[in-house]
Image (spheres, rainbow, N blue to C red):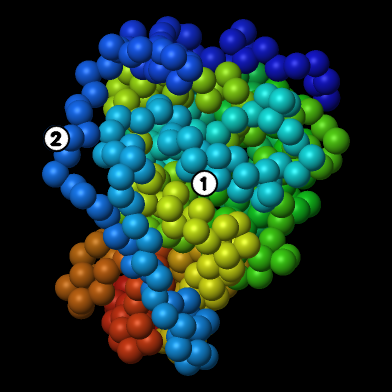
Amino acid sequence: MHSSPIDYDSKFISRAGKRWRPSGIRGLFPLEARPGMISMLAGKPNPATFPFESISITLKPSAAAAAAGTGEESETLRLSGSELDAALQYGPTAGQHEFLSWIYQLQQRTHARGKPQDEGWSCAIGAGSQELMEKAFAAVCDPEDTILIETPVYAGTLGFLQPSGRTLIEIQSDHHGICAVQLEHVLANWHSDPATSSLKFPKVVYSIPTGSNPTGSSAPLERKRLILELVRKYDLLLFEDDAYYFLHFDPKNRAPSYFSLEKSDGGQTGRVVRFDSLSKIISSGIRLGFVTGPNRILEIINLHTSNTNLQPSSVTQAITSKLLTHWGHERFSKHCEQVSQFYCEKLEVVNAAAERHLAGLAEWNKPVAGMFLWLKLNIASPGKEHEADSSDLIATRAVQKGVLAVPGFAFLPNAGKSPYVRTSFSLIDAASADEGFARLASVIREARVEAGLE
């Protein structure tokens, strides 16, 4: 195991990452805060020209209060004056100071207990965690690099990785997340396996450890320890895409994050880059996510931002910061518990409908987090399991019968066939779930007849 500090530039930073330079304007922004400084620096519009006088945000009564009929009233928060001027103005690249400070405190409480910031980690805000992931891969990976990627994997990640030219090496996942046995096999045999011997040894392994999109899998503690051990053994970085962390249905028994384990197990820190999202717990439309990881990698992400889209939206940051500051961390935690309970109840309804209609026609593991049921359709002809594919069945036949889902091939980094289908239970009600699975069952039965299974 490595014990010396990680030299990111010699091992991990991409050529493009090393070429980013501070913006000629934004690089000087921090100097405006010096006492007595007269700034003629930026072409910021004058707040006197902004047509907005105030922004009011009205909060719903909590779900628990509504269910209990306590008569809890809605709350109204207001942005005005200098606070609103700041929200409508250009702001810091990494995030507005108050909001970013709240996020630091959240990470300290949730993932970084005993891991002080002077150990070399920091946070940055982005327009959703997906934007930050794309910039993190760009900071680390050159076009000729290989990436070890949990499979099946979120289609959005494939959307920006596949056109990049990088080689994606699939590491299969099971109901407990990315498979440690296969990961070690691939790494141990990299130079002798004809499939990988001509490729560059990877820098990064990417995983979705909680309520994975699409599989719904969540990695338990022992699996995470094995993965982290391999990351250290083979000198890798781990990109932890944890958008569903707060949608765990049993948070008291949720495994600690990889970012947390780095410190708590006493091993070397600085190998985990963690991505969080507010989309699933506050609002998807505000487009806010955050990244936590080694200072050097965060520095390059911020340089990328400052030279491209400048910053995440000041307005949505200000609105969200107003909410979170008003709530405090304890009330935020309570809100997350209520949201996860909401989806847990959704799952029970949808899972019951699936059991009524799909028993014998499909197989699935009931998830402990997230928004998805990952169904394996029993449509394979005898002896031809490797040829089973849900693509036409889901994309054509199911659509004709009035039900939409996503065929499994959409989540494969290197294409191929898949008997799986992803169904989401986040929006659907009981009646629609029942009818939807009944229609899907009809389509599966037709395919089974054609395959000689019925």
Q: Quadrant of residue 7?
A: top right
Task: Assess disc 2: are there few (<14), some (14-19) or many (≥20) residues with their C-alpha within 10 Å of its C-alpha.
Answer: few
Instruction: Classify the position of the C terminus by image quarter.
Output: bottom left
- Name the side, left or right, on which 102 lies relative to 92: right
What is the three-letter code of the residue carrying label 1? Asp
State the residue in front, 340 or 439.
340
Instruction: Classify the position of the N terminus by image quarter.
Output: top right
Mark 2 vs 1, N-terminal side: 2
Residue drawn where x is 67% and y is 50% of the image: 110
Q: Is residue 336 above or below residue 125?
A: below
Disc number placed over residue 276 in the picture, else none: 1
Residue drawn where x is 36% and y is 30% of the image: 91
Q: Position of residue 323 (x, y in %)?
A: 44, 57
Determine whether the residue tagged by mark 2 lies in a helix, strand or loop.
helix
Q: Quadrant of residue 328?
A: bottom right
Residue drawn where x is 60% and y is 57% of the image: 329
Determine whether the residue tagged by mark 1 lies in a helix, strand or loop.
strand
* Mark nearer the viewer, 2 or 1: 2
Res. 362 visible in picture: yes
What is the three-letter code of the residue carrying label 2? Thr
**Count of numbered marks:** 2
- Residue linked to disc 2: 49
Q: Is residue 6 above or below residue 218?
A: above
Disc number placed over residue 87 in the picture, else none: none
Q: Position of residue 183 (x, y in %)?
A: 66, 38
Residue lying at the far front in this picture: please name it.
Answer: 36
